[in-house]
């Protein structure tokens, strides 16, 4: 079934690669006006070439002030896809403050910040809207070296539930989707594969 997003404006974070890029392309192909957010300029250039008319915003979502400056005046958004994430793999006893902070700033705090910006606009316009927070199966199961990344995704699950509870009365829906363990280049940093039963995973 062909979805039709004509007349709607969608903002996708982490749109330079992987799931975010494919989401931006699919929305564009379905008629939406797409705002693509990435910290990698070259990725935005190539995406804009593939999808003429895409609005590109280059910003590091781990930087609160830069994000506010880049997206504070983004204008009306009907659909928000919070997909941006970093997966910095370290064994639990080797996790550094820098990696922990960076991971939570990009993977969780940016979801809060960008959602607040977008939802305030939706409420001011008095229109319904939708938010999709892209999570991961590691929000529920454990893998070695993913203590920090898994924690950010587990926290996102609860943030999403709270958003749904509080924003529902304002006609703003919030939900989440779970991808594989890791996407893109991050998979190559770990010997564990979601498609290999011999590497396994253990919950609890």
Image: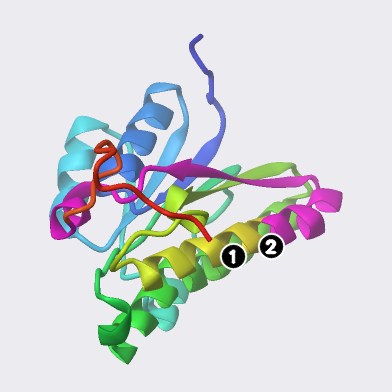
Residue 43, percent across and down?
18, 50
Marks 2 and 1 close (CB-CB < 8 Å): yes
Cα–Cα gap, marks 2 and 1: 6 Å
Numbered badge on residue 15:
none
Residue 41, percent across and down?
18, 58
Q: Is residue 167 magenta?
A: yes
Q: Which residue is mark 1?
A: 117
Left or right, 16 with reference to 72:
left
Left or right, 201 with reference to 113:
left
Nearer-the-camera pick, 164 or 140: 140
Would you identify the image quadrant in which residue 180 lies? top left
Q: Residue furthest top?
A: 1
Q: Mark 1: give few (<14), some (14-19) or many (20+) Cα within 10 Å.
A: some
Q: Residue shown at 25%/48% (left/top)?
A: 199
Q: Which residue is mark 2?
A: 120
Q: Mark 2: give few (<14), some (14-19) or many (20+) Cα within 10 Å.
A: few
Q: Secondary structure at mark 2?
A: helix
Would you identify the image quadrant in which residue 78 lies? top right
Residue 12, percent across and down?
42, 48
- Range of residues picked out in magenta: 161-190
Q: Residue shown at 17%/36% (left/top)?
A: 49
Residue 71, percent across and down?
46, 65
160 relative to 90, above or below: above
21 relative to 192, above or below: above
Nearer-the-camera pick, 197 or 180: 197
Q: Residue shown at 80%/45% (left/top)?
A: 171
Q: Is residue 18 magenta?
A: no
Nearer-the-camera pick, 198 or 52: 198
């Amino acid at each position: 079934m062909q979805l039709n997003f004509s007349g709607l404006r969608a903002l996708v974070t982490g749109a330079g690669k992987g799931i975010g890029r494919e989401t931006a392309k699919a929305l564009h192909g379905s008629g939406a006006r797409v705002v693509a957010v990435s910290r990698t300029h070259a990725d935005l250039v190539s995406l804009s070439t593939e999808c003429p008319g895409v609005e590109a915003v280059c910003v590091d979502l781990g930087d609160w002030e830069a994000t506010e400056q880049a997206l504070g005046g983004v204008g009306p958004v009907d659909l928000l896809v919070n997909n941006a994430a970093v997966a910095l793999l370290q064994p639990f006893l080797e996790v550094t403050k820098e990696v922990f902070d960076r991971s939570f700033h990009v993977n969780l705090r940016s979801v809060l910040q960008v959602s607040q910006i977008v939802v305030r606009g939706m409420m001011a316009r008095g229109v319904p809207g939708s938010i999709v927070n892209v999570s991961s199966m590691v929000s529920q199961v454990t893998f070695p070296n993913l203590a920090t990344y898994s924690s950010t995704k587990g926290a996102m699950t609860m943030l999403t539930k709270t958003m749904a509870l509080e924003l529902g009365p304002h006609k703003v829906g919030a939900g989440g989707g779970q991808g594989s363990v890791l996407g893109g280049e991050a998979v190559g940093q770990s010997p564990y594969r979601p498609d290999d039963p011999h590497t396994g995973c253990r919950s609890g």
